[in-house]
Image: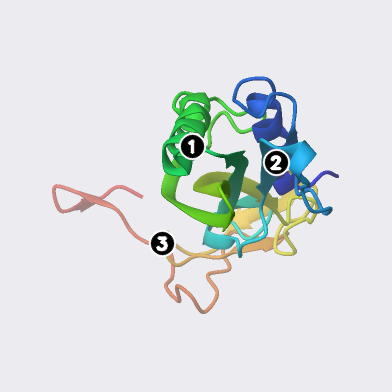
Amino acid sequence: MTHPRKLIRNAMVARLIDATAAGPRVYAGRPAPLEEQDLPAIVVHTREPEDVETYSASGFGGFTRRKCIAMIECYLQSYEDVDDALDDFADQVEGRFNSFDMPGFESGEIRLASTNSEVEWEGGLSTGCAKLRYEIIYRKGYRDTCSDPYVEANPSSIYRSGAYPGGRIYAGSPATQTGEACPIGEAELFSQEEPIN
């Protein structure tokens, strides 16, 4: 099974290819260093820690809500004003994600969290990198291949013990079993002070 982070990286790369000054030079987590002939270029990676924000109410067959950090690094060289060139480059990237339904994550949320840039000079040539930090909120299955140990595969033999709330599901237990969570007997119903059961 492909991890969602890989799907996120691939979707962002596909969104950026031939849509910015980098042209087709958009890479997912490129391990090799970029050389002068490779620029301008974009590298997308998800190496920052990923937060698991919430779990579904059910401990089984549920999901986790996660926040993935995707970094988009835009590299270029310029003999002119490198800050202007980096801003233009970053603006092209932002425009691609302002209204983007990521395939496979249509119910998720993508938002720009922060930006910054770094520049190095060698004579009159500037090499710069604009970094855009995106947060992607998505859901991932949690224990979705496990069965709940408190529930039998055959639902016909499942009863709820006691009164709700407080009752616990027991597989195959009689309906009269109240358990410790709700130690009460059968209730008697009244209508206008006359018993009706």
Residue 47 falls in image quadrant: bottom right
Residue labelled with disc 3: 165
In percent of the image, x 55 and y 62: which residue is there? 51
Task: Tell me residue 80's x, y (percent).
Answer: 49, 37
Q: Answer few, some or many: residues within 10 Å of disc 3's Cα (few below 14, many 20 plus, some between 14 and 19).
A: few
Disc 2 or disc 3, which is closer to the eye?
Answer: 2
Q: CA distance from mark 3 to mark 1?
A: 70 Å
Q: Answer few, some or many: residues within 10 Å of disc 1's Cα (few below 14, many 20 plus, some between 14 and 19).
A: few
Residue labelled with disc 1: 80
Mark 3 lies on a secondary structure that is loop
Q: Is residue 167 left or right of residue 40?
A: left
In percent of the image, x 51 and y 56: which residue is there? 118
Q: Is residue 191 left or right of residue 8?
A: left
- Tell me: residue 103, above or below residue 175: above
In percent of the image, x 63 and y 51: which residue is there? 62
- Tell me: residue 44, above or below residue 51: above
Q: Earlier in the sequence, mark 2 or mark 3?
A: 2
Hey, which residue is sitting farthest left in the picture?
192
Hey, which residue is sitting farthest bottom in the picture?
180
Residue labelled with disc 2: 9
> Tag 2: residue type?
Arg
Mark 1 lies on a secondary structure that is loop
User: Is residue 152 shown to the viewer in this render?
Assistant: yes
In percent of the image, x 55 and y 65: which residue is there? 168
> Tag 1: residue type?
Glu
Q: Is residue 192 left or right of residue 37?
A: left
Task: Tell me residue 182's x, y (percent).
Answer: 45, 72
Q: CA distance from mark 2 to mark 3?
A: 44 Å
Task: Tell me residue 31's x, y (percent).
Answer: 82, 54
Disc 3 or disc 1, which is closer to the eye?
Answer: 1
Q: Earlier in the sequence, mark 3 or mark 1?
A: 1
